[in-house]
Amino acid sequence: MVRCLFMRDEGLTLVEVLVVIAIIAILLTITVPVLQKSKQQGETVICTNNLRQLGIATLLYAQEKKFYPEGFCGNPTCHPSIPFAEYIKLGTSASNDWQNSRWWFHFLLLNDIIEDDFSRGGLLCCPSKRLSGTGLSGNLLCGNYGINYSICKIIMSSTDEFSGKPLQPEHVGSPSTKLLLMDSGYALVSWKALATDSTIYPFERPGRQNSYYLPGATINEQRFEDGTINEFQQDDAINGRHSAGKFNAVFADGHVGRKKPSSVEPVFDATGNILSNSPWSP
């Protein structure tokens, strides 16, 4: 039998192996960024959908009750309907925040407007958050969504602007421009997340100021250097959660949009008071 001149018994040569490896490396270089981008886009879609549902639920609550839900109720009579043992399962280091308290999302749950088991990946959890370490991974209050409590006020707040009863829907002027819910470092958020000087504009809840920020805001870099942002939330705070450093938000008319933090910076008058045409102030 005549043996084909092009047949050989040995395997691939070193050059051929190197060529194959180079091709695989090129394909990975092309494919991995595409997959990462697709994953990021998918998380952004989920985040947008979560906020849209929460926004609708908040507006339904406001229509039914004639006022928005309270941002936080720390009154000892404000026992949540869900057993405290369920919160313990989250492994949160902020157990006292849950006990004998209600947050804005509790009011939506209590009125059967939303259903959520507080599990990771649920409606109240942002899939795009960038937290490191394990200390905050189970804390629903940090690194998910925050409500603007210039609107959803706190009756027992320490500052006049955020104290008193939550607003009625008709008291929010130009609702299409007013922030209601958004990506946030903490479950409560206001224009003070963008304040350049916390000594002039102190945080309403100083014990939580290290989680109090708007993701992607330029000021967060300085705040991290000053030690007023949690080290485990550095990436989330400085780099943001979505492309171009934008954050997702629900406005008081119910529509969802993506904004740059620089576009929602607070506007002040000559005396240092926030103006009503700010997206934060009703």
Image (cartoon, rainbow, N blue to C red):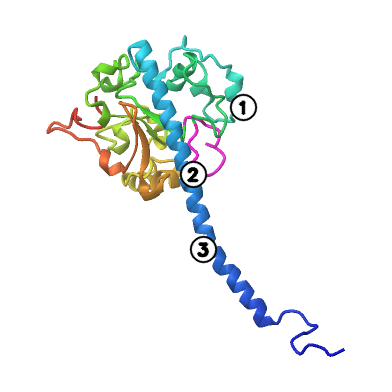
Q: Mark 3 or mark 1, which is nearer the start of the sequence?
A: 3
Nearest the viewer among 129 and 47 is: 47
- Whether 136 is among the magenta residues is yes
Identify whether 189 is placed above or below 64.
Answer: below
Nearest the viewer among 91 and 22 is: 22
Secondary structure under the numbered disc 2 in the rendered image: helix
Q: Residue tagged by mark 1? A: 89
Q: Residue tagged by mark 3? A: 30
- Span of residues in magenta: 125-141
Q: Mark 2 or mark 1, which is nearer the start of the sequence?
A: 2
User: What residue type is disc 3 on?
Assistant: Ile
Q: Mark 2 or mark 3, which is nearer the start of the sequence?
A: 3
**Residue drawn 29% across and 24% down?**
150
Secondary structure under the numbered disc 1 in the rendered image: loop
Q: Which mark is residue 8?
A: none
Q: In this rendering, would 16 be left or right of 268?
A: right
**Residue 35 at x, y = what percent?**
52, 54
Q: Residue tagged by mark 2? A: 42
**Residue 107 at x, y = what percent?**
44, 16
Identify whether 234 is placed above or below 135.
Answer: below
